[in-house]
Image (spheres, rainbow, N blue to C red):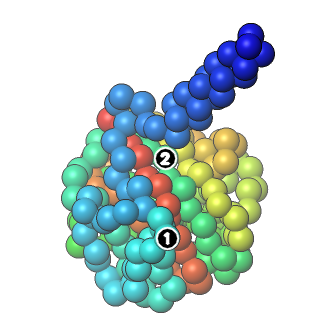
Amino acid sequence: MRRAYVFILGLCTLSLVTLTAQAPGPDWVTLFDGTHLNNFNRVGNANWTLANGVVEATSGPGFLVTKDVYENFEIKVEFWVDEGGNSGVYMRCQDAAKITDTTCYEANVFDKRPDQSGRTGAIVHIAKPLAIVDAGGKWNTYEITAKGPQLTVRLNGTVTAQADDPKFAKGPIALQYAAGTVRFRRVEIRRL
């Protein structure tokens, strides 16, 4: 009887730990969980489709742009691109209708970018990658912090870019489709 009690208690504890690891903390807001795109506007002509818990595009170009504006924040983005995929997470965009890498900060997702100084993990035009982490063909997680002029990009737990740049103070966030197959399955954010 005691073994059964210990076994059941262990299963309950494991279930609680699993649920805690998957659920965002009290300050985190889920922008995308695979079920709807209510927190985003579509900009451009990417063929975003929602199915099987992910949003995917295979032609475009285009963006999913948050309806809210963010200043200081931490964001987690789970994404998948094929080997030739080109995507990115754009932050503090200055014009929600015209997203570019010169009017927003872009944490790039483009392993095969001809100019490798702006490849996956870099903040395009601002910070070259500190580490080479390829994203093609697997699920990845970007953890990006923007606090005042300080920007930090982590890809799968590795710091890939850091910058101190005061150019853009606030703006919406945009998820990019540019080439290949691009998927997003979870996006969470918390204000700092």
Q: Secondary structure at mark 2?
A: strand
- Counting from the top left corner in percent of width and height, residue 37 is at 31, 65
Q: Residue at x 67, y 48 (%)?
A: 156
Q: Secondary structure at mark 1?
A: loop
Vertical relation: 175 (above or below) 50: above
In the displayed structure image, the side of residue 8 where residue 29 appears, left or right? left
Q: Residue at x 54, y 56 (%)?
A: 78
**Which residue is disc 1 drawn over?**
52
Residue kind at label 2, given as amino acid type: Lys
In the displayed structure image, the side of residue 7 where residue 108 appears, left or right? left
Vertical relation: 121 (above or below) 184: above
Q: Quadrant location of residue 82? A: bottom right
Lower position in the chain sequence, tag 1 or tag 2: 1
Q: Quadrant of the C terminus?
A: top left
Q: Residue at x 32, y 82 (%)?
A: 44
Image mark for residue 173:
none
Which is more foreground, mark 1 or mark 2? 1
Q: Residue at x 61, y 44 (%)?
A: 154
**Which residue is disc 2 drawn over?**
76
Can you see residue 103? Answer: no
Using the numbered discs, state the Cα–Cα distance from disc 1 to disc 2 in whole angstroms.
20 Å
Q: Quadrant of the N terminus?
A: top right
